[in-house]
Amino acid sequence: MLSKGVRCFTYIAVDGVEVEYTVPKGNVKRGDQHQFLHDHLEVESSNLPHFKFIGNFDFIVRQDGRELTKQWVAINSMTGKLEDGSMVNMEQTPSIFANDLIITYGFYDAGPGLAELPKQHQCYVTVTKNYENWMRDVIPQGSDKSNHPFHKMVLPSAHDIGMNNMSSSLSLLKNAGTGIIKEVLGRSLPHALTIINKVGDGAINRIAPDIIRALAITQKDTLDTILKIGARYFEFRPAKCHRQMQKVSPLDDTWYFQHGAIPGMPYRVLLDHITRFLVDHKDEIIVVHNRWDGVPGDCPRPNDDELRDALNDILREKDLKAGNQEDMMHKTIHDLRESNTRLIILKDCGQASNYDDAANATLTGDSMVEKLSSMCEDPPRGHPVTLLQCQATATNIRDVIIASVLDSDVSTSPILATKPVCDHKILPLLKGDVGRKLMGEEGVVVILNDFFDGATADVAVGLCRERLG
C-alpha cells in the first residue's frame, strides 16, 4: 500500500476552540484544553480515486463552530512529496491573528527518513490568547502580585530572535566569492565544512543560502508578532559582520545579531521594535540580554559606550527608561512600572541552563528529558537568570546535516524536524513538578524555544502566575 504519514501535534488554551485534521477518508478532532495532544493520519493511495496518488492533508481551526483558518498541503502517496498547498515551505506559515487569539503552526516536510530524521510529515498547531498584554492581565498594577520583586518572574523567550529571516544573510552573500563563503560558513556553522567538502566550488554560492536556512534560521515570525505571542526575554549577540565578508557586502557596517559569523537582525531593529511595543503596552516589561557566545573575533563587538549610544538614540523622545541587572534583581514589578523602567538591558549576566551539547544533539528529545530530570536532583541556586531551553540542536549531528541539506529539499530543516517532538516532551515537564523544582529561590526564569509558539508562552505565563502566588 502506498502511503505517507502525518503526525499531528496540538495545544489549545482557549474556550470553544477545536482543531480538525483531515486526510482522504480520515479525520481527527481535538478540543481538550492545556493538553499536549498527538495524533497520526495517513494519506493512503487506497483511499484515493483509481490511479490517483495525490491527496490533501489539511487542518481547520474553529471557535464556537466558526472557521478561523484552514491550511493544507497536497501529498503524493507514492513519493511522499508535497505537490502544492499553503504550507509547502516555512515562509508560508506565519502566525494567524483571529478573535483576539493567536494560531501558531508549522509543517515539517519529511523526506524518506535518512540519518534517522522523521520519515513522516509533522504538523503542529497551537491556539492561545493574544498575549500582548499578559503582564498587565496576570499582574495588575497595584495588586499584591505587583509588589513581588521582578526576579520572581518567569519569562517566555524566542531563542536566537535575530535569526527570524534570511534578509541580512542573503545580502551578505550577494557579492561574496567562493573562498570567503567557504571560510565563513565553515567556521560559523556546525558540520558546514562536511557539506562544503561534498560539493564542488561551483556549487558553493548556489547552496550557501540552503545551508544557512537549514542550520541557522530558528524563528519564522516577525518580532512584532513574537511579542504579541508573549515573548518578554531576548538574548542578542550584537557585532559587526565578519571583516572579510564586509569588504564586499552591501550591508551597513553596523551591529547585527551574529550566529557564528552569519548576520541576522540589526541591533537597532530589535531595540526600535521593542521600545515601540513598550510605549504602546504600558504594563509590559522586557529583558534584553547581550552576550557574545560563539561570535568569532573577526566580527567586531561594540564597547559599552557604543551600546549605550545605540540605546539612547532609540530612547530619545520616548517616555521610557532602561534598567540594568540591579533593577531586575532588587526592584519590584510595581516600582519598575511606576518609574517607567520597563526595558532591562543585561550584559554577560550570570546564568544557569539545562542546555548540554551532547543531550541537546537529539532527534527525539529523550536525552533532554534525562538532563532535565537530573537537573531537578540539584536545582540551580544563586543565578540571576535560569534558562530552561526546549529546543534541540540536531544541527550538531553530522549525518543529519548532510541528509537535510544535500539529500532533501530545503524545507526539511532539522531544527523544524525536532520542534513538535521535543515540545511535547519538554513543555509538559516544565509545566509540572520538574518546572516547579527548577524555579529556585531567586533569579528570573526563562523558557526558550525555537519557532516561538503559543504553547511555550502559555506554559511560561502559567508558571509565572503560580510563582507569584
Image (cartoon, rainbow, N blue to C red):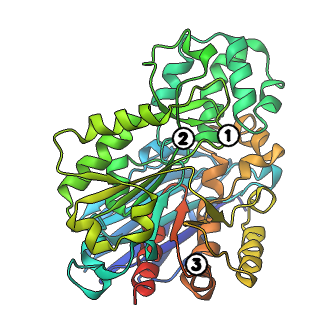
Total number of numbered discs in the rendering: 3
Residue flagged by tag 2: what amino acid is it? Arg
Per the model, the C-alpha gap separating discs 3 and 2 is: 26 Å
The disc, 1 or 2, on the residue closer to the chain's N-terminal end is: 2
Q: Distance between the residues labelled 3 and 1?
A: 27 Å
Q: How crowded is mark 3: few (under 14 residues within 10 Å), some or many (20 or more)?
A: many
Looking at the picture, how far across and down is residue 299, in whole percent?
60, 26
**Residue corresponding to mark 1:** 294
**Residue 62 at x, y percent in the picture:** 31, 73
Q: Residues within 10 Å of mark 1 (few under 14, many from 20)?
A: few
Disc 1 to disc 2, C-alpha distance? 9 Å
Vertical arrangement, residue 469 with respect to residue 431, above or below: below
Compared with 361, 424 (above or below) is below
Asked whether the viewer can see residue 283, the reply is: no
Q: Height in image: 109 above or below 62? A: above
Labelled disc at residue 430: 3
Q: Residue 99: image x %, image y %?
A: 21, 68
- Residue 433: tell me if it is visible: yes
Q: In this view, does 109 lie to the left or right of 97?
A: right
From the viewer's side, name the closer residue of 6 and 207. 207
Please tell me the numbered disc located at residue 237: 2
How far across and how far down the image is residue 112, in percent?
A: 75, 50
Amino acid under label 1?
Answer: Gly
Q: Are marks 1 and 2 in contact (CB under 8 Å)?
A: yes
CB atoms of marks 3 and 1 within 8 Å: no
